[in-house]
Image (cartoon, helix red, strand yellow):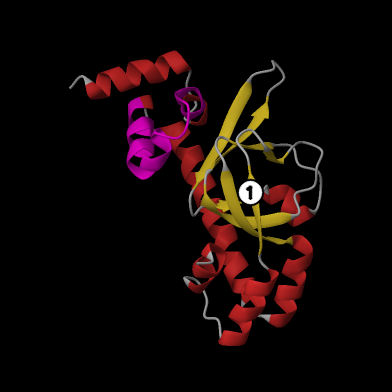
Amino acid sequence: MNIFIENVKKKINLNQSEEKFLNEIIEEKIYLKNDFFIQPGQVCSMIGYIEYGTFRIFNINTKGIEMTNWLSTDNDIITEILSFINEQPSQEYIQCLENTKVQFISFINLQEIYKRIPNFHIFIKLVYEEILVDLKKNIFSNIHMTTIERYKTFSSSKTSLLNKVPLKYIASFLGMTDSTLSRVRKKIYSK
């Protein structure tokens, strides 16, 4: 099964020749635990889907503290969106938290896909919209929700990440300290 093509077909129709072309152009890469998908200063040249595994997207602030911006796992899209779209150096780290397999297309191949499959623009537009909506939801949850509400929302929508991601990264992603997350979990699970 090609997870990339399956996700494309959920958003746009492909004829047989288009699907065959995508099968030929989609690449796969396996990353080992702690490998980097991208680091600051590198240009992200690929966009893909995670077949299995988990990535953490993070920055290091001026105090040297790692700040988790996003967590991605099975069937999620993976790219460093600003670097990919603008073809400029990344300002983020994307690192594997476990062995991870990605099916991807390169930026160069994406330009060829646009020529051969005109509807692919629609697919990419829909992917970008999903990324934007998810980012805005996360921003608003950090502004408008209590720590308990943020954790409950995360744990109900990202259940698979609870067993894959160290709690310190979940705490950082939710905008709280490790000790705050510990207190939140204690309140929730002691009821």
Residue tagged 1: 30
- Give percent across and percent down for residue 174: 47, 30
Please report the residue visible at 60 percent of the width from the left and 53 percent of the height from the top.
102
- Give percent across and percent down for residue 127: 56, 61
- Give percent across and percent down for residue 26: 66, 66
Q: Nearer the viewer, residue 6 or 11?
A: 6
Prevailing SS of the magenta stretch: helix
Name, please, the residue furthest toward the left: 191
Query: Magenta segment range?
Result: 148-170
Please report the residue visible at 50 percent of the width from the left and 48 percent of the height from the top.
134
Please report the residue visible at 51 percent of the width from the left and 31 percent of the height from the top.
173
Q: Amino acid at mark 1?
A: Ile
- Give percent across and percent down for residue 189: 24, 23
Q: Would you place residue 91 above or below residue 102 in this image? A: above
Q: Would you place residue 52 above or below residue 8 in this image? A: above
- Answer with left or right where residue 87 lies relative to residue 65: right
- Answer with left or right where residue 32 lies relative to residue 91: left
Instruction: Decide whether residue 163 is among the magenta residues.
Output: yes
Please report the residue visible at 17 percent of the width from the left and 22 percent of the height from the top.
191
